[in-house]
Image (cartoon, rainbow, N blue to C red):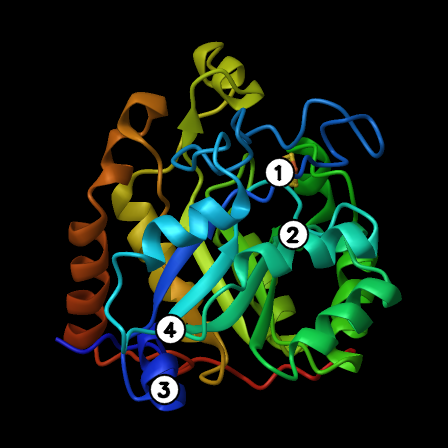
């Protein structure tokens, strides 16, 4: 069954005529929201490995890339994804050295960099644009919500104008931006979710990653959950809200992900989060049954960039 939204798979077929897979890299960075530069403790949901629990930090960047590429077919195509923590949180020469360490093979087509908006400067955007002469370069920004009150509640460490500035800079340099959004954040309703989606539309984002908030062990959110201060949304609510988000999302925005990813032994709750196939299939079936597709309720938000 074809997804009723614009998937990354479809984008990659449009660009390369085939499926393209991802090599996830631990670039050896940390995060200014953890080391005291902008905050301590990090976002309340963030695990000890900064969303890189499945990566092997004992391997060098080159070893991580080669571990995958050495077994890959000669005609395969790859995205190198600097995944965990903040992958622009270092001086430009250090960033270059680390990105270059992964870009070892002609089969790599995309350099994908996950980061925070407060770690995007003009120098960094200009450096990334240099890579865009040879590779597709994507920049992933962890927004999670456009609501600053929620951002404070999850200790995100920056407010919406910072995100808007980062997107403006990246767009100035022609770099595609993928925005991370979380549904089910503390205190948020469907209205908050749709406000975030409208913001993503209005900044002219190129891609989006959506998932439901889940609770990892040994996080601030875990303490809140165990104290009864936070209750995660149900699978049913996630599916309802995810469908609403997709129908309000501009049809031009590529949907890179619709589920979260957490190692079972690290997950505290909710346990439905690991049923990724069921979640995706249910979204597809519900949308098909109701005659819904991505953007069918999109009203063309005025770009405020
Ligand atoms: S910005 Fe990312 S790495 Fe940093 S604390 Fe938040 S979730 Fe963790």
Q: Give me the C-alpha separation between circle 1 and circle 4.
A: 26 Å
Residue closest to the eye, 228 or 73: 73
Give the labeled residue for mark 1.
28
Along the polypeptide, which appears first: circle 2 or circle 3? Answer: 3
Q: Tell me if residue 202 comes above or below residue 140 in the rendering.
A: below
Where ligand 1 lies, by image quadrant? top right
On the image, the x and y values in percent for residue 178 come to: 56, 66
Task: Characterize the local packing of mark 3: few (<14), some (14-19) or many (20 or more) Cα atoms within 10 angstroms.
Answer: few
Out of 266 and 127, give the one closest to the viewer: 127
Q: Are marks 1 and 3 in contact (CB under 8 Å)?
A: no
Circles 2 and 3, Cβ within 8 Å, touching? The answer is no
Query: Which sits earlier in the primary sequence, circle 4 or circle 2?
Result: 4
Q: Secondary structure at mark 3?
A: helix
The residue beneath circle 3 is 16
Q: Callout 4: helix, strand or loop?
A: helix
Q: Using the numbered discs, state the Cα–Cα distance from disc 3 to disc 4 in whole angstroms.
A: 12 Å
Which class describes the residues within 10 Å of circle 4: few (<14), some (14-19), or many (20+)? some
Whether the residues at callouts 1 and 2 have beta carbons within 8 Å, the answer is yes
Q: Is mark 1 within 8 Å of ligand 1?
A: no
Query: Tag 1, which secondary structure?
Result: loop
- Left or right of 286: which side holds 105? right
Indicate the secondary structure of the residue bearing disc 2.
helix
Residue depicted at 73% across the width and 76% down the height: 129
Q: Which residue is identified by label 4?
A: 8
Residue corresponding to mark 2: 98
């Amino acid at each position: 069954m074809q997804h009723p939204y614009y998937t990354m798979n479809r984008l990659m077929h449009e660009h390369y005529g085939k499926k393209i897979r991802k090599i996830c890299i631990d670039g050896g960075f940390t995060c200014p929201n953890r080391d005291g530069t902008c905050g301590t403790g990090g976002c309340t949901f963030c695990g000890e490995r900064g969303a890189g629990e499945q990566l092997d930090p004992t391997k060098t960047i080159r070893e991580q890339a080669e571990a995958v590429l050495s077994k890959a077919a000669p005609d395969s195509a790859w995205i190198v994804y600097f995944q965990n923590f903040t992958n622009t949180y270092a001086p430009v020469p250090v960033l270059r050295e680390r990105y270059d360490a992964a870009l070892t093979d002609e089969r790599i087509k995309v350099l994908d960099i996950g980061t925070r908006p407060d770690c995007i400067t003009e120098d960094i955007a200009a450096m990334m644009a240099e890579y865009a002469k040879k590779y597709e370069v994507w920049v992933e920004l962890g927004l999670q919500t456009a609501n600053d009150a929620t951002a404070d509640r999850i200790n995100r460490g920056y407010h919406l104008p910072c995100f808007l500035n980062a997107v403006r800079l990246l767009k100035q340099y022609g770099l595609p931006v993928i925005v991370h959004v979380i549904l089910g954040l503390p205190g948020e309703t469907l209205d908050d979710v749709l406000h975030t989606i409208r913001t993503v539309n209005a900044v002219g984002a190129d891609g989006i990653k959506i998932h439901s908030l889940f609770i990892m062990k040994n996080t601030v959110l875990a303490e809140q959950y165990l104290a009864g201060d936070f209750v995660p949304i149900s699978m049913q609510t996630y599916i309802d809200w995810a469908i609403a988000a997709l129908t309000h999302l501009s049809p031009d925005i590529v949907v890179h992900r619709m589920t979260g990813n957490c190692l079972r032994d690290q997950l505290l709750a909710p346990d439905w989060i690991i049923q990724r196939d069921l979640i995706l299939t249910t979204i597809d079936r519900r949308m098909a049954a109701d005659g819904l597709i991505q953007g069918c309720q999109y009203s063309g938000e005025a770009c405020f960039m």
